[in-house]
Amino acid sequence: MVRVAFAWLALWAAVAAGQSRAASKPLPPRAFQLIAVKVSGTERYKPEDVIRATGLELGRTVGEDNFKDAARVLGDTGAFTSVAYQFEYSPEGTQLELQVQDAQQFAPARFDNLVWFSDQELGEKLHARVPLFRGQLPVTGKLSDDVSEALQELVDERKIPGRVDYIRIAQGDGPTEAFVYSVTGPHITVGNVEFSGAAATELPPLEAAGKKLAGAEYTRSALRTQEDKNFLPIYLEQGYLKAHFGEPEARVVANDANDTRVDITLPVVPGKRYKLTSIEFSGNQVVPQAVLRNLVHLPSDQPANARQLADDVEGMKQLYETRGYMDVRIDSVAEINELEGSVGYLLNFKEGEVYRMGDLEILGVNSRTRVQLQNSWTLHSGDTYDPGYTRRFVAQALKQFLTPGEWSSNIQETRNHKDKTLDVTLRFDPKP
């Protein structure tokens, strides 16, 4: 859950000495026309953007109420921690100075599925409507709402039947990390996926993975998930340890009242290819280094297959778990030599303590079958816990005590960190 906090800014006004005039010398009407606005104190915004955001226009007749409103408008955006002004009337006209101080906390704006506009077009059109929009938004104030309203106007102008909204992205109760804007209503699906910048050797597996997305709902966030899951591993397997993908470009190829299909171009930046030099171990006491090395399937002097290394580390964790070390942690530290294009890995082990068997609970079956299963369970309270035994037991139970193919199973392991025991709940349910 993301918290949204709003803060009001303290505004103050200092009126220059030239404001007061003797009653015997009234100022001409021209004196109340705005002829100049100066902005000071901001490093984030251009003065002309700040002036546009106030709504003040040169040549208009103004008074102090207009300046108060302008200062309030700037304060409400959240872009500034303080806003002050001073002005001076003269026979030539009114001159205004705005003194502002930039806010410090900003987060980027991201556009998840507004496929009818390029990023550049969105940036330009939003800046024209919301002068203080420059790709990032203050985490307080109403500027994020102003951007949402401007996007809705753009969508309406294109006659797209959708509603624009946004969410704030944060880690737990932490600060806002991004504003993600999207439109709901149109059904947007993926057509073809192309990979620009990919070499001929990587292109076939990339295209094969891309074809699986055909017909799927398109959002940038969903596509990012696919990158990490299906695209990036193709490069990691070949030693491209710093490979990454640029922002996807969505091109509308079919569009009607409710359905839109887009072709995706995904830029690839492979980076340098690294060769494996060595794998070292640190902190392992329970399992000898020779045993751990037998679980490594990466040959030296070959491209560093980071995906295989991850699988090997997972195998080491499973070995530790069979010995009761359920909290084992293995951190892989890459030591890269850019000059030689090589990498060595240091695997740091934090083994933790042994967990022992706690209570067993079996659910979903009749009392007779439950007793049979409990009598067949041989991992007694106080024994070193082995999750592999639990998986084997469930597989055998489905064959021996229940009708094969007609039951599903679920294993729940509850760790008691204080006394280092582990309670097991086995649930069996008849398939519908």
Image (tube, rainbow, N blue to C red):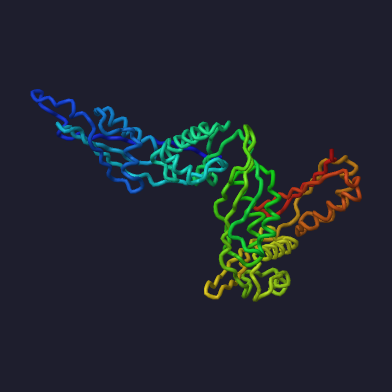
Q: Is residue 352 visible?
A: no
Which residue is rendered at x = 51% and y = 39% of the image?
Answer: 3
Nearest the eye: 51 or 180: 51
Q: Residue furthest front?
A: 253
Q: Which picture quadrant has residue 216?
A: top right
Q: Residue furthest top?
A: 23
Residue 200 in percent (x, y) is at 65, 64
Q: Is residue 251 visible?
A: yes
- Above or below for 93 versus 121: above
Residue 378 in percent (x, y) is at 84, 55
Residue 238 in percent (x, y) is at 65, 66
Q: Which picture quadrant has residue 430?
A: top right
Nearest the eye: 347 or 243: 243
Nearest the eye: 281 or 270: 270
Which residue is rendered at x = 85% and y = 52% of the image?
Answer: 395
- Looking at the image, residue 117 sits to the left or right of residue 7; the answer is right
Q: Which picture quadrant has residue 389?
A: bottom right
- Above or below for 260 versus 211: above
Residue 400 in percent (x, y) is at 91, 50
The C terminus lies in quadrant: top right
Q: Residue furthest left?
A: 24
- Above or below for 302 versus 112: below
- Looking at the image, residue 395 sits to the left or right of residue 212; the answer is right
The N terminus lies in quadrant: top right
Which residue is rendered at x = 37% and y = 44% of the image?
Answer: 103
Nearest the eye: 142 or 111: 111
